[in-house]
Image: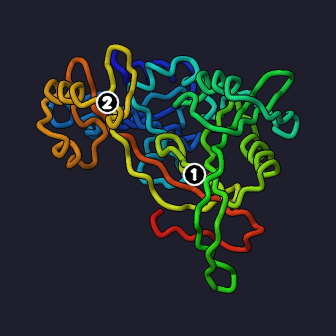
Amino acid sequence: MGFEEDVIRFFKETGIGFCRRGNDLVFCGKGIVLHLIPFVCENTGTRDCRESENASCVSSQSDVSMACIGGDESFSTINLFQDYWYRGGACLKDRLMAHLGVYEPVFARKCEVVRTDMNTVSAFYAMHHSYGPAKSKYHYALYHKGEIVAAASFSSARRMRRKILHGTGCISETDCRSYEWVRYASVSGMRVSGGMGRLFKAFVSDTDPDDVMSYADMEWSSGKIYRAMGFEDAGFKAPVDFIVDLATYCRRPVSRVDERELAAVMEKTGMASLAEISSVQGKNVLALCDEYAWIRNFGSRKYVWTNPRLHGKILFSDP
């Protein structure tokens, strides 16, 4: 059974109604489109999962209509790569269900915020974050009934020269203590209402930063939650290429693969040069062989929060 069939079988078993159009599973009543990305090389011409004649409707509800598909901007899209489906296990499935409204609700106001250590949050991120732990300095956890239900981590400060646009229209320059919001995660299958906001407020209270930047992963998020918290869109971060080992579904950025191994992967996938791969546009699976897949993610959007005491908005000449 293939990747798409595995995903479809899972959602059939949950009883949640959906329509299928090619590689999109559309959950009409939930406002969610799940876009599946199988490891099939589009260059081979052997398969195009987006052909309209492949459309089918899979539903446990008779009123689900194909008319709900097609350009409706009220729908949020989740992009699901094949490697993440098989690597993510039960936690990934719980996370998908939470996006579809099937989750255990917890309110952050009923939780306790605790500043904690790297070891504690690393174990939590390994279980509940798509990319696992990351190096950072400030760590906070939200506890409910003695258990961690959400965590956030932030970098140390960097001194940055910033341009500030004030409400009067004038621009000033000042040295700012800039931080990065490196990680946030909640327990898979749980929706912690207000969790991000409460942990962020704790960090701001402790450090009084001039600005905080973070990135919204375009595979899962449009950045709406950041905008709701007062962050502003500061530009797009380009997509990243990865090599996926098809035996383990381990994903590594191409930039971290040594030259000898990279050359071997390119030879096996039939790619002549890095320039050839870099020139590929509009595709997520760039090259494929029995052992490896060369994929490109969707990039991310940069968001920046400016401390209100600066009385202005930070300008970015190179967002």
Residue 209 is situated, as x and y percent measured from the top left of the image, at 72, 56
Say if 23 sits above or below 159 in the image: above
Residue nearest the observer in this picture, 30 or 45: 45
Work out how far the residue at label 1 is from the one at label 2, CA to CA, in angstroms.
30 Å
- Where is residue 178 shown, x and y percent of the image? 63, 56
Instruction: State which tag comes first along the sequence, 1 or 2.
Output: 1
Residue 161 vertical placement versus 2 (above, below): below
Mark 1 against mark 2, which lies toward the viewer? 2
Q: Which element carries disc 1, helix, strand or loop?
A: loop
Q: Is residue 275 left or right of residue 161?
A: left
The residue at 50%/53% (across/down) is 301
Identify which residue is drawn at 48% across, 60% down.
235
**In terms of image quadrants, where is residue 169?**
bottom right
Residue 55 seen by the camera: no
| Image x and y of residue 63, in percent | 54, 37
Q: Quadrant of residue 273?
A: top left
* Mark 1 Cα-neighbour bin, 10 Å: few <14, some 14–19, many ≥20: many
Say the numbered circle drawn on residue 257. 2
Q: Is there a contact, CB below 8 Å, between mark 1 and mark 2?
A: no
Identity of the residue drawn at 39% across and 51% down: 238
Near-viewer residue (274 or 244)? 274
Res 250 seen here: yes
State left or right for residue 106 relative to residue 36. Answer: right
Amino acid type at mark 2: Val
Residue under numbered circle 1: 223
Q: Nearer the viewer, residue 315 or 138?
A: 138
